[in-house]
Amino acid sequence: MSAKYLFIASMDVDADREGVFHDVYDREHIPNLLTVPGVRRVARYESEAFDISLGGEVRHVPVAEPRFHALYEIDSPDVLVSRSWADAVERGRWPSEVRPFTTNRKHRLYRRYGE
């Protein structure tokens, strides 16, 4: 990771809208946000249960909520309040066909340690 900041948008989506969610996210939403100055990279992830060895014992960690996550490498928190960002998040089918069907939305911003 080369960006100073990591912004994470996490959410769940109604089961019957999952197909359109993925299609719009990959084909429209991410490409729109990648046009915003200061957005370097975007990657999407889905929560998954896992096992981990800690202190000599294996522990099971269940699926975290929300289920879907988009990680944005950005140059500054100012990117998130820029006019370009505001315009990009309102383009395409996202506002009408996806956003109303998302729940459990969480947003986080992290600054790379030592910066």
Image: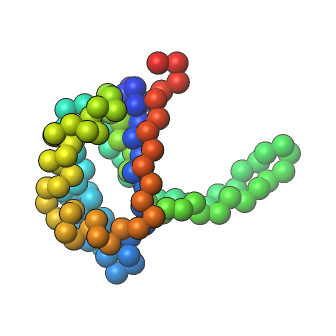
Q: Position of residue 111 (x, y in %)?
A: 46, 29
Q: Is 47 rendered above or below residue 115?
A: below
Q: Position of residue 52 (x, y in %)?
A: 72, 50
Residue 14: in sight, yes or no? yes
On-image quarter of the N terminus: top left
* Quarter holding residue 55: top right
Please indicate whether residue 76 sits to the left or right of residue 95 in the image. Answer: right
Residue occupying the point 32% across, 72% down: 101
Of 45 and 29, the residue lying toward us: 29
* Quarter holding residue 71: top left
Residue occupying the point 26% across, 57% down: 26
Q: Is 25 rendered above or below residue 113?
A: below
Residue occupying the point 14% across, 47% down: 87
Of 33 and 27, the residue lying toward us: 33
Q: Is 67 rendered above or below residue 76?
A: below
Q: Position of residue 112 (x, y in %)?
A: 48, 27
> Which residue sits furthest top?
115
Please indicate whether residue 91 sits to the left or right of residue 30 in the image. Answer: left
